[in-house]
Image: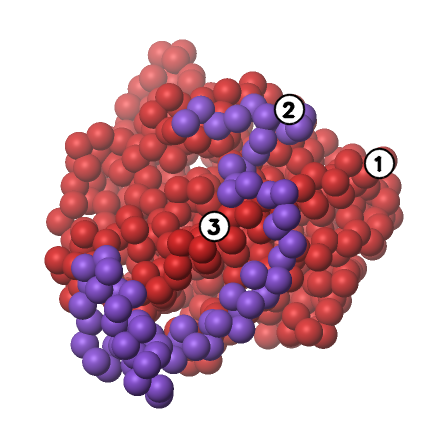
Amino acid sequence: MNPQDVDEVRMLLARSGVEVPQERLESLAKTLQEYRSRLKTLYAVDVEGEESAAVFRSGEGWNEEATS
Amino acid sequence: MTKANSELHYLTIREAARLIKGGELSPVELTQAVLDRIDAVDGDLKSYVTIVADSALASAKEAEAEIARGDYRGPLHGIPLGHKDLYDTKGVRTTAQSLVHRDRVPTEDATVIRRLDEAGSVLLGKVAMFEFAMGGPETSLFDQAKNPWNLDYVTSGSSSGSGAAVAAGLAMGSLGSDTGGSIRGPASYCGIVGLKPTYGLVSRYGVIPISWSLDHCGPMTRTVEDTALMLQAVAGHDPRDAASAREPVPDYSAALREDVKGLVIGVPAHYCYSADAGIDAGTIASVKKALQDLEGLGARVEEVHLPSLEYASVANNVITLSEGYNYHLPNVISQPQNYGEAFISRLYLGGLFTASDYVQAQRARSAMCREFRRVMKRVDLIAMPTGHRPPMRYDEYETGSWLHWPSFMAAFNQTGMPAISVPCGFTEEGLPIGLQLAGRPFDDATTMRAAYTYQEHAGLHKKHPSL
C-alpha cells in the first residue's frame, strides 16, 4: 500500500472529524484505489448542460417539482 | 372458515379480506394463525427482530368488534403485517438493526405506519434488515433473516426480513424500503412481489434514512393485488415529507386487469444480456421466457438503448454513500464501535468521495433522467432481470463484493420511476428468480397491471417454500 494513499484517506476523513485506526486506513485506501476505476466511468459521462439533479424537472410533463 | 388453520398463513390479503368482510374469518383467528406460524418456523428463519403478539391480538380483537358492528374499514382491516425495523412505530422499539439504536423507542408512528393503522391492519412486529439499510447480512444487532427456500442462502437486502417473512407466511405483507434495490432484491430472492413506487408517492416521514434523494418506501407481498392494496393505503401527499408529491392517487386495484395488449415493453438487451455484466445464464433464460409470455399475451417487446445503465450503479453508490455518511457522521464520530463491520466499512467510503464526485454523480443522474424520458416516449415499460444472479450461499457472500456488481435496479432509484419485481422462475436448486418491470413516474398502476397479467399467466405466486 502506497503511504501517500493512506495519508490521503486519513486527511479526507479527518476533514469531517473522523479518526480511524491505521489498519482501517490501509483497508480504506485499498478500497478507494479499487473504486477509482469506477469513478472514471462516472467522470466519462457527458454532463454538458446538466444541472445537479433534482429527480424531476418542471415543465417536462412527468410531474410537478418536489415541494422542498 | 373452510381452510384449515394451518393454511391460513398463506391466504393472500385479498382472499383474507373477502373472508373477513363476509364474516367467514375472524381477524383474531387469522392473526393467531400467523403468530403460530412465526412460533413454528422463525427460530430458524430469523425474520423477526421484535414480535408484539399481545398488542397484535388486541388489535385483531378490536378489528373483529368493529367489523361485527358494521364498521368495516376496507381490505386491510384485520390483516396482520410486519414491517422493516426502520419504520418508526410508537412505543415499539425501532432499531434499524443496529446497536446504535438498540434502545430507541419512537414516540410517534411513521406516516405510513399511521395510515396502515387507520386502514385497520394489525402490527405483528418488526422484521430484520441489513443494518441501516446498507452493507450486508452481518449486522451489529440481532440475527440475519434466512432465505425460506433454502436456509443456507441469502435473502438479499436490505429488506431481508420482509422478503423472508412474507414468502414463508409469517406476515401477509410488509413495508420495505429501497435506495438501490432493497425492496426488489429481496422480493426477487424470496419469490414474492416488491414494488418501489414512484419517488414522492409514498411518504418517508418517520423512516430512518440512508439517502434522502434515493430512498423510497413500498410494499412487499405475495401477489400483485396485495401490493396494490397496500400501496392504496399508504400513497398520497404528506406535508411532513419534503419530497412528497401532490399527484392524485388512482384506484390501483381497479386498474389491475389481465391485459397487456398494446403495451410496449423496452428491453435494454445491450446491458442486461451482456456477457460483460456477468449475468447468470439461467436468469437470462427465465427473463426471456417471461418476456415471450408477455408478447404472447399481447404486449410488444422491443430493444431499447440506455447507455446510462453502464454508470447507474456507481452514481447510485456515490450519492447513497455521500448522503449516508453525512447523515451518520455524528454517530460515526461518537460511537463507531456500535456499527457492524459490513455497514461501516462501506459507509466510510462516503467520507472519501469529494464534492466533485457527488456533483458529478448528480449531474450524471440528470443525464440519465433525460435519457430515460426520451426512451419512455416510445415504450410504456422497461423490463430487465431484477438481480444479475440468483441467491448465493451465505458462505459465498463477500462483504466487499458489491463494489463490482452490476445493478439493474439502481437506475430507477435515480429516475424515480416505479419498478416492481415479480417472480418469473426458479433455478435448478429451487431458488426464485425475479422479473423487473418499470414504468413512467406516477404510472405505478400500469407497472402493476403488467406484473399482474404476467403473474396470473405464470402462476408462480401459488408456490410456497416447504418450510
| Amino acid bearing label 3 | Val
Q: Name the residue under label 1.
A: B261
Q: Mark 3 points at which residue?
A: B359
Give percent across and percent down for residue B115. 37, 26
Tell me what hue chain A is rendered in.
purple
Looking at the rendering, which quadrant does residue B206 occupy?
top left
Residue B156 vs B443, above or below: the answer is below
Badge nearest the viewer, 2 or 1: 2
**3 and 2 marks on the same chain:** no
Which residue is drawn at the image coordinates 25% and 72% (left, top)?
A: A10
* Residue farthest along the bottom direction in this orientation: A1
As helix, strand or loop, the secondary structure at mark 1 comes to loop
Residue B436 vs B91, above or below: the answer is below
Q: Nearer the viewer, residue B455 or B379?
A: B379
Give percent across and percent down for residue B397. 44, 76
Going by the image, does A46 lie left or right of B110?
Answer: right
| Amino acid bearing label 1 | Lys
Which residue is drawn at the image coordinates 42% and 17% (left, top)?
A: B72
Q: Which subunit holds the residue at mark 2?
A: A
Give percent across and percent down for residue B130. 35, 59
Q: Residue A59 carries which label?
A: 2
N-terminal-most mark, 3 or 1: 1
- Circle 2 packing at 10 Å, graded few (<14), some (14-19), many (20+), is few
| Amino acid bearing label 2 | Gly
Tell me what hue chain B is rendered in.
red
**3 and 1 marks on the same chain:** yes
Looking at the rendering, which quadrant does residue B248 occupy?
top right
| Marks 3/1: CA–CA distance | 42 Å
Looking at the rendering, which quadrant does residue B191 occupy?
bottom right
Badge nearest the viewer, 3 or 1: 3
